[in-house]
């Protein structure tokens, strides 16, 4: 039995230097003193697999850049056992100028206060659950606070966390000596509308962490109302409470395939704030006219009691598909992901009975009515120039979840049998293009209506608010104007979807999303700035539908509720703008890390599938593994330890690279002959751009749009679909190269 490798203090000196070069490499604006030491003194003396050579990366960039050298250092850390072979290093390499751009993320040593901030948040959460009742769970005891037999110990913050709070947060204007107290009784008890037995449909994926929005429909003498019911954590949390300020410090939740970093502790969502656990909601209601415009609206705190939790795939079975993009087009004219979604998700026959779905007939009728309302509103936005794009998408799940976080200073090298018996299971679902599911379209449109209602409410009442917008397409030359005109003319009038290649043609002319304290137009949503001088003139757009995971939404709930109560404002316009700017930048950074992490694990999935094919795995495993069947995918996850992995773990190299470095024979040693393999896996690649006659850049259309470099056999053009096989895949380096079959 092999002896566990232990790192000495001398080893750790070198490891710390390699980690510094890997996670914060030298750039144009930052000189890392360890970069030259590691690149010239260590990496250059190792076998040629670590040589700093031009790298064909999946984003189209070519080395040898500082980031490429940093990835070589990352690979070395994995080979040494400092990191697990499958470690997602996207988080760790997210540094600028030697400092992490995500200081509030805990568990990785990005700051000297992040771990403590999470610890304090959890302690405050435990106290909230102990001290406060679930409002309206029992009408007789609706607002009676619980009494503690003895007081809790004070939750003390360290100097570093106190400094971060002072430097990175803005204290509300109404803070006072009672800020450490939770809300013991609901200030809106006499104002909340009780929806009684009206069914509220909470539609989400089965693995959703936060259930923060639901929808309902109500027929009144005035007409039919659509209600969007949003979770109401502000029923329990004052804006200046330490828990609220810690939420502001993080700003937003971040979701990765292997773990998530919630803005508010999971225990609060699971036990108190999620719809279905809490009866309190903020309800944004609207009545849609025959023209699709909002004819009337209301904003009010509410009580919801009859909550029905459903998943998208079940709701799809009872909704109309006639307005889904591509449903009326010929298969040969559709993109691969459209064909896959319609083949896998569209029911052969719509059902309104419980025989094929868990949804009863009454609920099915109400959901169809909500869909009709949402469709009328969508058609209005389309008529005003609104559209979205036919973009493929995928999701990746990792099991066990969450994966343990690698120690920052491991004393022993990683070993399969000691640390984890098998690599984590990676499950990829290529059917995640939300615009190809009627349930997702319906919920999304209802949330757009709710956000418009919130914008109108804040504008009419002059409440300082965070508005979102997008300017029209940038000014172009006369020669380029036809590109934009053709793309806008290609928008499908039923679904509002712009075809994929048309969207790519206008992407260079798009303006970035902006924020302001005044209403803005939102070009792609078809929302105008307007004057908002009357009910008939709805203007601007904001987000209020995710208060459990976005502080900006939580903030707007406090601002609106204070206005309803007639209480002083908690932030003035200057404070709102300062908060909005900081939160907007933090949200963009976290979204980028989340996207890159999902891409990392998708490449890991492709790698495993390719390894299985090259090792002679049965066709049933190699091909059925494309679907997310747990049993089949579990075989893929377990199969890898039996493979001779080579120095970097299992990495699939292209033929040209194999011939040019000494590792080729070792990597090939675990492969079987072609005659012992099943039919080779192929992928439908849509060419986004072509560099020359032999290479280009594209996406794997039947795998949710995973980006890749493409090696071509002959001259091709952008928009063509090419059948390709994997040539090179290295998740740690962000490299995926496919070649035309």
Image (tube, rainbow, N blue to C red):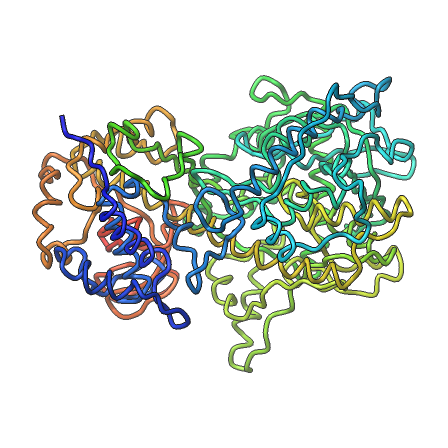
Identify the image quadrant of residue 677. Answer: top left
Say whether residue 519 is left or right of residue 719.
right
Q: Is residue 276 visible?
A: no
Q: How many marks?
A: 0
Q: Is residue 732 visible?
A: yes
* Residue 23 picture location, percent across and down: 36, 56
**Residue at 46% from the left image edge and 40% from the top image edge:** 431
Locate the N terminus and report the quarter of the image it occupies.
top left
Q: Is residue 550 above or below residue 713?
A: above
* Residue 415 picture location, percent across and down: 24, 33
Who is closer to the viewer here, 686 or 74? 74
**Residue at 24% from the left image edge and 30% from the top image edge:** 639
**Residue at 51% from the left image edge and 30% from the top image edge:** 348
* Residue 452 picture location, percent across and down: 75, 52
* Residue 362 picture location, percent across and down: 72, 23
Who is closer to the viewer here, 33 or 338? 33
Who is closer to the viewer here, 529 or 65? 65
Say whether residue 648 is left or right of residue 307.
left
């Amino acid at each position: 039995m092999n002896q566990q490798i232990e790192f000495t203090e001398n080893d750790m000196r070198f490891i710390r230097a390699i980690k510094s070069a890997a996670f914060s490499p030298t750039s144009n604006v930052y000189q890392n003193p360890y970069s030259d030491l590691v690149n010239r003194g260590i990496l250059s003396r190792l076998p040629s697999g670590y040589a700093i050579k031009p790298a064909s990366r999946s984003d189209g960039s070519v080395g040898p850049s500082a980031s490429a050298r940093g990835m070589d250092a990352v690979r070395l850390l994995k080979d040494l056992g400092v990191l697990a072979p499958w470690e997602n290093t996207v988080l760790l390499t997210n540094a600028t100028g030697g400092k992490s751009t995500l200081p509030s993320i805990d568990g990785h040593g990005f700051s000297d206060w992040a771990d403590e901030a999470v610890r304090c948040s959890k302690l405050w959460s435990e106290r909230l659950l102990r001290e406060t009742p679930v409002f309206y769970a029992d009408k007789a005891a609706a607002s009676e606070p619980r009494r503690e037999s003895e007081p809790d110990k004070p939750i003390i913050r360290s100097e570093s966390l106190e400094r971060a709070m002072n430097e990175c947060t803005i204290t509300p204007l109404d803070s006072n000596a009672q800020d450490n107290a939770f809300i013991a009784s609901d200030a809106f008890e006499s104002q909340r509308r009780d929806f009684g037995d009206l069914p509220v449909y909470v539609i989400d994926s089965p693995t959703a962490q936060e259930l923060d929005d639901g929808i309902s429909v109500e027929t009144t003498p005035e007409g039919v109302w659509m209600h969007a019911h949003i979770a109401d954590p502000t029923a329990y949390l004052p804006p200046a409470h330490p828990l609220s300020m810690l939420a502001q410090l993080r700003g937003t939740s971040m979701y990765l395939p292997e773990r998530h970093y919630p803005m508010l502790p999971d225990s609060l969502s699971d036990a108190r704030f999620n719809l279905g656990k809490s009866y309190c909601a903020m309800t944004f209601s609207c009545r849609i006219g025959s023209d699709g415009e909002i004819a009337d609206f209301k904003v009010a705190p509410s009580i919801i009691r009859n909550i029905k939790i459903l998943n998208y795939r079940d709701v799809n079975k009872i909704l109309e598909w006639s307005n889904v993009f591509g449903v009326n087009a010929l298969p040969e004219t559709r993109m691969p992901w459209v064909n896959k979604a319609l083949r896998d998700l569209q029911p052969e026959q719509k059902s309104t009975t419980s025989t094929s779905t868990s949804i009863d007939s009454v609920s099915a009728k109400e959901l169809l009515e909500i869909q009709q309302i949402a469709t009328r509103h969508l058609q209005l936005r389309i008529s005003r120039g609104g559209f979205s794009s036919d973009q493929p998408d995928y999701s990746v799940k990792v099991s066990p979840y969450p994966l343990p976080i690698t120690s920052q200073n491991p004393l022993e090298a990683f070993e399969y049998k000691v640390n984890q018996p098998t690599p984590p299971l990676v499950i990829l679902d290529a059917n995640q293009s939300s615009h190809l599911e009627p349930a997702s379209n319906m919920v999304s449109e209802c949330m757009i209506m709710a956000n418009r209602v919130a914008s109108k409410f804040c504008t009419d009442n002059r409440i300082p608010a965070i508005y979102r917008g997008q300017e029209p397409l940038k000014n172009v030359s006369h020669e380029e104007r036809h590109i934009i005109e053709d793309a806008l003319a290609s928008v499908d009038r039923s679904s509002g979807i712009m075809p994929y290649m048309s969207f790519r043609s206008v992407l260079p002319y798009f303006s970035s999303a902006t924020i302001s304290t005044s209403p803005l137009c939102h070009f792609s949503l078809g929302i105008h700035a307007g004057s908002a001088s009357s009910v008939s003139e709805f203007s601007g757009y904001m987000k209020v539908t995710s208060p459990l995971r976005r502080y900006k939404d939580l903030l707007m709930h406090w601002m609106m509720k204070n206005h309803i109560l007639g209480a002083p404002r908690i932030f003035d316009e200057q404070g709102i703008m300062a908060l909005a700017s900081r939160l907007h930048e933090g949200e963009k950074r976290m979204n980028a890390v989340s996207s890159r992490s999902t891409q990392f694990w998708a490449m890991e999935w492709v790698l495993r599938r390719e390894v299985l094919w090259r090792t002679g795995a049965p066709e049933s495993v190699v091909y059925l593994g494309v679907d997310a069947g747990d049993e089949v995918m579990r075989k893929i996850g377990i199969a890898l330890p039996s493979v001779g992995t080579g120095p970097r773990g299992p990495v699939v190299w292209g033929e040209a690279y194999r011939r040019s470095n000494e590792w080729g024979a070792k990597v090939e040693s675990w492969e079987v002959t072609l005659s012992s393999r099943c039919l080779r896996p192929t992928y439908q690649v849509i060419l986004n751009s072509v560099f020359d006659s032999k290479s280009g850049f594209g996406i794997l259309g039947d795998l949710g749009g995973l980006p890749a470099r493409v090696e071509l056999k002959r001259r091709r053009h952008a928009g063509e679909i090419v059948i390709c096989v994997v040539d090179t895949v290295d998740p740690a380096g962000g490299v995926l190269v496919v070649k035309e079959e």
